[in-house]
Each structure stands twice: as C-alpha cells, then as structure tokens.
Amino acid sequence: MHEQLRITATIGLFLIIAGVLLITGLSFKKEDNNQLMPGITYGVLTGLFIALYTFNDTIAVKSYAVSPLPLTLGTNFFGAILLFPFIVSKKEELKRELKLHKWIIIAIAILSPAAYILVLEALTYAPLTVVAPARETSILLGVFMGSRVFNEEDGKRRLFASVLILGGIIALSLS
C-alpha cells in the first residue's frame, strides 16, 4: 500500500506484539506452554487470516473504490452459501438456537457487519497501519471481561499487557 513505516509506528507495533505475548502467558519453559499452544496456534492462524482479508479489503476500498456496504454484504452472502450445507444438516439444532437466542443472534447479525463496514470506511480515510491495529481494541474489552466478569486468572498481568497494546495503538495513530 506504499505506506511509510515511521519510528512511532514501529514502536507501536512492538508494543502491541509485546502486549499480545504477555496476555497469552507464554513462558520460556517449554513444559509450561503445552496447554497454551493450541490456543496460540489457532490465535495466530486467525490473526493471519484477519490480516490477509483486511489487506485484501483495503486494496478493494482504496485502489478500486469498492463501497464498504456491498463488499461486506457480498462477503457475508458468500459465507452463508459456503455454510449452507452445514446448516441444512443441523436443522433441529438451528431451530433450538433460534428459539433460545433469537434476539442475540439478530443483534450479532447486525452489529458484526456494521462494525466491519466502519473499519472499511475508516480504511478509506486512514492508513492500514493505523486502522488494522486500532480495530483490535476489542482485545482490551475481552481482557477486561475475562478478568472481571469471568474471574480469569492473572488479571493484573493481562491488564498490564492491555496497557501495552493500548500504548501501541496510540503510537500507531500518532505516526
């Protein structure tokens, strides 16, 4: 995308990486990491795919002037088509879930695409190196909820890691 990588952006990226590593609880002792590795592996793979589709979508909205709304709707439609065979095979489970959680499902069906449309809109105005990490502020909310709502362990360590991530996001926004 030909964006300049400034020193503040580099510092921001390192702060985010340090914060993420600290949140995971990854240890230098291999035996301590056995339970963490599946989560870290899937987390890294998820991050890789998010980075790839964010980069691809950035090219679409910046280079080809594709509007965020049809891009998001098209992506969700294509995903629904791919998932359709799995949905058909689980009709009873789908009916039960709709009956039990109809309003939550509707809220997620509206809010999730709306959030990504906002990301795509932001990408039309700001550099990818700023928008992509800033959208991950959801990590901060997840850490807060995990430590406060679900009483997960190591709340202080994760909170400190969140501060590092937030500092990295701020540094990126200043670049």
Image (cartoon, grey):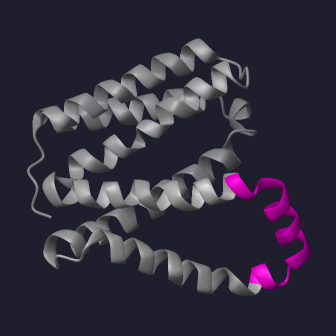
Identify the image quadrant of residue 124. bottom left
Residue drawn at x 38%, y 66% is: 52
Identify the image quadrant of residue 171. top left
- Was residue 106 drawn as part of the magenta stretch in this picture? no
**Position of 55 relative to 11 (above/below):** below
Q: Quadrant of the N terminus?
A: bottom left
Q: Nearer the viewer, residue 131 or 161?
A: 131
Residue drawn at x 32%, y 55% is: 119
**Position of 89 relative to 133 (above/below):** below
Q: Quadrant of the C terminus?
A: top left
Q: Main secondary structure of the magenta part?
A: helix
Q: Position of residue 104 (x, y in %)?
A: 68, 52
Region in magenta: 86-103
Answer left or right for 72 relative to 120. right
Residue drawn at x 51%, y 18% is: 159
**Position of 84 relative to 69 (above/below):** below
Q: Nearer the viewer, residue 39 or 125?
A: 125
**Position of 138 relative to 161 (above/below):** below
Residue that extends furthest to the right in the rendered view of this protein: 92
Q: Nearer the viewer, residue 41 or 66?
A: 66
- Total labels: the figure holds 0
Answer left or right for 145 relative to 127. right
Answer left or right for 4 relative to 46. left
Residue 106 visible in this rendered orientation of the protein = yes
Q: Position of residue 22 (x, y in %)?
A: 51, 26
Answer left or right for 94 relative to 129. right
- Was residue 95 drawn as part of the magenta stretch in this picture? yes
Residue drawn at x 14%, y 75% is: 63
Residue 27 visible in this rendered orientation of the protein = no
Q: Position of residue 6 (x, y in %)?
A: 10, 40
Q: Position of residue 118 (x, y in %)?
A: 33, 55
